Amino acid sequence: MLWYFLWIACIVIFICGLCCVCKKKKKTLQIVGGKALGWQTNGNSKPSTNLGRTEAENDRDDLETDLYHWTKTLRPIQWFPGHISKTEKELKEQLKLMDVVIEVRDARIPMSTGHPQMDAWLGNRKRILVLNREDMISTADRNAWANYYARQGVKVIFSNGQLGMGTMKLGRLAKELAGGVNMKRRAKGLLPRPVRAGVVGYPNVGKSSLINRLLKRRMCPAAPRPGVTRELKWVRFGKDLEMLDSPGIIPMRISDQSAAIKLAICDDIGERSYDAADVAAILVRMLSRLPTVGMTALHGRYKIEADGSCGRGFVQKLANHLFNGDTHQAAFRILSDFRKGKFGWIALERPPQ
Ligand SMILES: Nc1nc2c(ncn2[C@@H]2O[C@H](COP(=O)(O)OP(=O)(O)O)[C@@H](O)[C@H]2O)c(=O)[nH]1
Ligand SMILES: [Mg+2]
């Protein structure tokens, strides 16, 4: 009997031992595999720790999660000026006339400037995605987004509405995509007509500037604040292209408050809709986590001593140091410095995993 129990105990100990060895082996293999993947990426990125993603990319994901928690405690940001619901209605009617739709987004926040209903409105209509303000992001940001959209098979053009980069290509692509319209007309014995391209997107992303640059004339009013274009307007380019400039559209309720904060930081929604100090505090927290900025750069820029304060504390410190305690002015300075690229040109969003 005793021998029988001893025999069973030995078998159990042997099986447990085997399991532990297997687990250890598996763990070791994972670490080795992770590093090996990292070495194969380009020399600029840090070694990968998670399925070929760089540490910087993983840090960005963590930052998004933290941003979600930071914004949860703030007063929600909502901005929906009266003219937008009218625009939405008119745009849907004009859609029928468009041979191709050009959707313009802010290259600093391509996700947050994508309208949640756009896909449903456009259906299988031909479309071109434009990431404007390309001068306001880094080359690494641009490459990350270009690869992301290439993988999805989405046609994307990077542009600069202020200087005109990308606009010629945009005009060419619009004509090319909509070329079928005139083939059909010819087949029916009808004369060709100009191709119609509708330019749509969030407020202040550069829609009117792009059209003006393409036309080489200021036909559409453009200004550095959201809500300037108030009505839809077709503009003619030579004899074969027409473009529709439209006021920015934005959902009536912004359900994603991380997106709302980023829209505020990038000046893509009216400044009356948010508390500048709240928004600047979050921007400071975000910048403090970006490897190209960090707290040292923030302290250096404003010549204030490091005391561990971040977010609201930092805004207050800057207010005391430069603006007689006025937090609104301090917040506005931080926001406008970011918008002017004083912390370097950086995208606030990188492609999702
Ligand atoms: N730095 C930079 N500024 C731009 C760019 N495109 C437009 N802007 C500026 O952004 C502001 C808003 O542009 P606007 O065309 O009125 O935007 P819309 O509201 O989408 O029509 C204007 O002050 C433009 O000069 C760009 O690519 N880079
Ligand atoms: Mg406009």
Image (spheres, grey):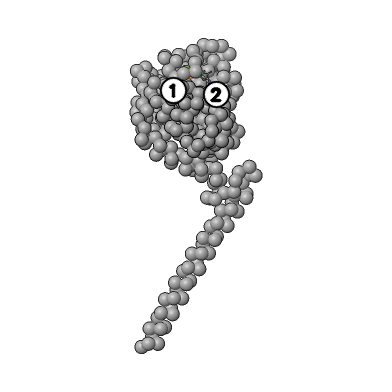
- Name the image quarter holding residue 327: top left
Could one spot residue 346 in this view of the protein?
A: no
The residue carrying pointer 1 sits among few (fewer than 14), some (14 to 19) or many (20 or more) residues within 10 Å by Cα, namely some
Judging depth in this view, the residue of 91 and 295 nearest the camera is: 295
Q: Amino acid at mark 2?
A: Lys
At a point 43% along the width and 37% down the height, the residue shown is 67
At a point 47% along the width and 25% down the height, the residue shown is 319
Tag in front: 1 or 2? 1
Q: Secondary structure at mark 1?
A: loop
Q: CA distance from mark 1 to mark 2?
A: 21 Å
Q: Amino acid at mark 1?
A: Asp
Q: Which residue is mark 2?
A: 340
Judging depth in this view, the residue of 141 and 327 nearest the camera is: 327
- Name the image quarter holding residue 16: bottom left
Q: Which residue is mark 1?
A: 326
| Whole-percent x, y for residue 138 in the image | 58, 32
Q: How many marks do you count on the picture?
A: 2
At a point 51% along the width and 30% down the height, the residue shown is 108
Q: Secondary structure at mark 2?
A: loop
| Whole-percent x, y for residue 82 in the image | 34, 18
> Does residue 13 sit above or below 92 in this rendering?
below
